[in-house]
Amino acid sequence: MANKIIKNSLDVMEKGLESLKNIKKDKKEYREFLARVKALPEEYQFVYEKISHYMWGNFGGGDGYDLIAIQTDLLELFEASVAEGKKVLEVTGEDVAEFSDELLRNARTLTENQREKLNRSVQKKINKK
């Protein structure tokens, strides 16, 4: 019994250490990401930050991972556009909100996830019979 308790305690400690390592790694990656944003020309930084704020304020739910992927893609697009010598509005167009909405259309929302879960649940139960 005591061996089992010790083993469980060691397992919990190991998982905790692994979690801390992941947090440290994630923080490092986030700092590197922010440094890339800060390396953009001022007009690109401004538009990136405005789009980012707009996205987080208008994202319909989900776990946010899709939004992070979209923001990463946006940063890469902006970096490539800077390298090509383009102005930021040449990339986004004059209607930056529409550009942002188009990016968000690629994100999975909480509603979409819940709809799929509901349909799977019903189909599984009904098709079982």
Image (cartoon, rainbow, N blue to C red):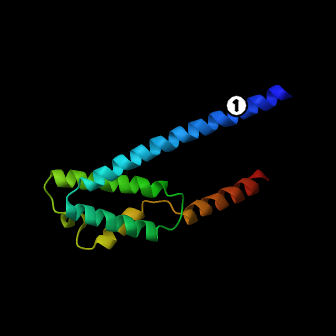
User: Which residue is situated farthest in the top direction here?
Assistant: 3
Q: Where is residue 120 in the image (x, y as percent from the top left)?
A: 66, 56
Looking at the image, which is closer to me, 122 or 85? 85
Looking at the image, which is closer to me, 57 or 20? 20
In this image, 33 relative to 42: left or right? Answer: right
User: Which residue is situated farthest in the left direction here?
Assistant: 85
Q: Where is residue 107 in the image (x, y as percent from the top left)?
A: 45, 60
In this image, 125 relative to 70: left or right? Answer: right
Q: Position of residue 75 (x, y in %)?
A: 30, 54
Identify the residue at image location x=18%, y=54%: 82
Q: Where is residue 60 in the image (x, y as percent from the top left)?
A: 51, 68
In this image, 90 relative to 2: left or right? Answer: left
Identify the residue at image location x=25%, y=56%: 78
Identify the residue at image location x=29%, y=50%: 36
In this image, 63 relative to 95: left or right? Answer: right
Does residue 47 sit above or below 76 in this rendering? below
Looking at the image, which is closer to me, 34 or 80? 34
Element type at mark 1: helix
Q: Name the residue under label 1.
A: 10
Tag 1: amino acid:
Leu
Residue 46, quarter of picture: bottom left
Looking at the image, which is closer to me, 5 or 82? 5
Q: How crowded is mark 1: few (under 14 residues within 10 Å), some or many (20 or more)?
A: few
Identify the residue at image location x=86%, y=28%: 1
